[in-house]
Amino acid sequence: MSSRPKTSKSDPSLPAPSRQRWRIARRCVQVSSIVLFALPILLAGWTLLGGTVGGANPLATPAELPFFPFYGTLSSSELVGINLTDPFATLQVVFASKTFMLEWLWYALPILLLYALIRGRVFCGWVCPVNFLLEGVDFLRTKLKLQVKERVVPRRIKIYVAAGILLVSALVSIPIFEVFTPIGAVSRGIVLGSTTGLVVLIAIVFVELFWGHRVWCRSLCPLGGFYQVLGRVGLINIRMDYDRCTHCGNCSEKCLTDPEILDPVLEGVETTVLAGDCMLCGECIDVCPTKALSAKLGLEHFKPSNAAKASKAAKPAAKDTTKK
Amino acid sequence: METQKLAPFLAGGVVAAQAAIFAVQHAMKRSHDLLRPPGVQDEQDFLARCIRCGRCIEACPYVCLKAANDASGMAVGTPVLNVRDQACKLCEDFPCVNACPTDALRNVESRADVDMGLAVIDTELCIAMKGMRCEVCYRVCPLIDTAITIDYRPREGDSIHAIFAPQVDAEKCVGCGLCVERCVIDDPDLAIKIVRDREKAIEETHIQQARV
C-alpha cells in the first residue's frame, strides 16, 4: 500500500465528495436506537437508570403502552406483539440450558434475517451503542493527542471468542456473554439501571484510549464475531469503480472495521468488498473524493469472485494480497 | 510509553478479577437466596435461560422487580425482588411471566402455581406472640385465611387475654412477600421474612415453633 502514489488533490473536473451523508444517516440510526429503547420507559412515566418506584396501586408499564407498541432492550424486545430476541443470546441459552424450543427460533429469526439480508455487522456500525461510544472516544483521543497502536489483535479472533462463549455457556450453564456484555452495560444500563458488563465497558474505553485502536470491536467482541460470520452473505455491499480510484488512501484511513478489508478492491483484484467484517458504515464512501466507492444491492457473495476467477485462470497469487 | 505497555494488562486484569469473583460467588451458590419473580423453576434452570433483557422488569405494574447489581455476582442484571421495598402483588395475568422471551419464567397459570419462597415468622420478634393484636400480615396476605391464618389461643398464665398468632401454611404460601412489606416490626429485625428454599423455610419454622 505504501508504494502507491498519494494524491491529496482530486481532479477538479470530477464531482465533489458526498461530504457526510452516510455518517449523518448512521448517527441518526445510532441515536434512534438508544432513544427507541428509552422512550417506552419515559412514555410510561417511569424513570431511566432503574430509578422508578412502585406503589400499592398499579402503574402504566412500558410493556403495555396503548399507543406505543414497542419496548425492551437490545437483548429482547417486542414490536406490535412480535417477540424479537438477539440471535446470539438465543444461541447461548440453547447451549446453557441444553434445551431448544421452536418459539425461540421464531423470536430470533426476524433479527437474524434482517442482518443476514443487509450485512451481518451492520448491527455494529449502525446500532451497537459501544461502537457509537468508541467513535466518541476516537474524537476524544484525537483531542488529547494520544497515540495508540493499530491491529494489536487479529480481527478473526472474535469468531473464536464467539465460539468460546458458546462453549463456556454450555460448561457453566449460564449464557455467559450476557453477564459481561458491555453492549448491555449501555443498553440495559440506560433503560433498567443494570450494571451488567460495566467493568468490561470501562476496560474497553481504557484500552481504546491508551493501547490499541478498536481492539474490542475489531478483534474481541463475540457478537461482532457472530455477525462477521453472518456477514459472509448480505445484499448490500461496498463496490469500487477501479477506474475512478486515485489511490488517495482516504478510505483506508477512515475504515471503521479494519482498512485491510478494502485492500482487494484497492488492488483491483475484486470489485466488491467481500469481507464478512464490513459493517457498512459508509465512511469510505463519504471520504472518497472521486466517488469511486458506492453501496450497491446485489448478490455479490454468491457470484464467483474475480479473485477466484483469476486464480483459476492463472496462479493463486492474487488471493494472498488479502492477507498481511 | 509505559501506559501503552501496561494498559492491556491492567484492563485484562480488572476484567479477569471480576470474572474470578463472579465465579467464586457462583460456586458458593450465592444467588440461590435471591428472591425471584413468579415462574422461576429453580435457580440453576433460571440462570441457564435468563438473558437479562429486563422485559419482566418493564412489564411489572408495581415495579417490584429490579435488575440485580454487581454484588450478586453471576446473577448481575437478572430480575430480583426486595419484598420489604415492594412485594409481588401476584397480578391475575402475570405480565412478567408472559413477557419472558426465553421461558426462564414459565408454568404459571394461577396464583397457586407461584413458588417464590415461604414466609417465616420470627416468634421472638412478632408482637402478636407477645399478646398484642397486630394481624397486619394476616390482613394484607393476598391469600388471606389460606396462606396465613390466625391461631387463637389463651395467653399462658393469663386467664382473660388471648394470643392471636399468625400461622403460615407451608402448602399454601407462595412467597409473594406482602406480609414482609407491611410488617410493623423492623427493629432489631423484621418479624417475618421470605425464605426461598422451602425446605430450609420449613426447618426454620419448626425451630421457631419449638420456641413458643
Image: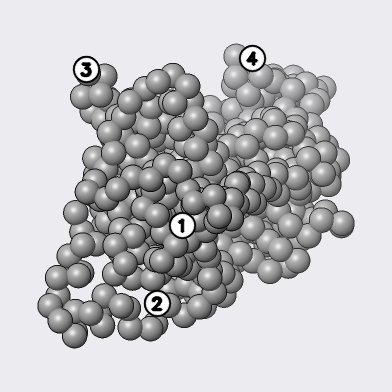
Q: Which residue is mark 3?
A: B2
For label 2, the residue is A301
For the residues beneath circles 3 and 4, the answer to whether they share a chain is: yes
Q: CA distance from mark 3 to mark 4?
A: 54 Å
Name the colouring of the figure. Answer: one colour
In this picture, residue A56 sits left or right of residue A30: right
Query: Which chain contains the residue that carries disc 4?
Result: B
The amino acid pointed to by label 1 is: Met
The amino acid beneath tag 3 is Glu
Image point (56%, 62%), residue name: A85
| Occupied quadrant, residue A13 | bottom right
> Is there one chain holding both mark 3 and mark 1?
no
Q: Residues within 10 Å of mark 1 (few under 14, many from 20)?
A: many
Residue A45 is labelled as none
Q: Is residue B48 left or right of residue A80?
A: left
The residue at which mark 1 appears reads as A279
Query: How much space separates mark 1 and mark 4, taking CA atoms?
Result: 58 Å
The reply to whether the C-beta atoms of the residues labelled 2 and 3 are less than 8 Å apart is no
Q: Nearer the viewer, residue A161 or B144?
A: A161
Q: Residue at x 76, y 47 (%)?
A: A40
Q: Nearer the viewer, residue A7 or A213?
A: A7
The three-letter amino acid code for the residue at tag 2 is: His
User: Looking at the picture, how far across and down is residue A296, in whole percent?
Assistant: 53, 71
**Circle 3 chain:** B
Q: Mark 4 to mark 2: distance in Å?
A: 69 Å
- Residue A255 visible, this angle: no
**Which residue is under mark 4?**
B187
3 or 4: mark nearer the eye? 3
Q: Are marks 2 and 1 on the same chain?
A: yes
Q: Chain of mark 2?
A: A
Mark nearer the viewer, 4 or 2: 2
Residue A128 lies, in percent from the top left, at 53, 48
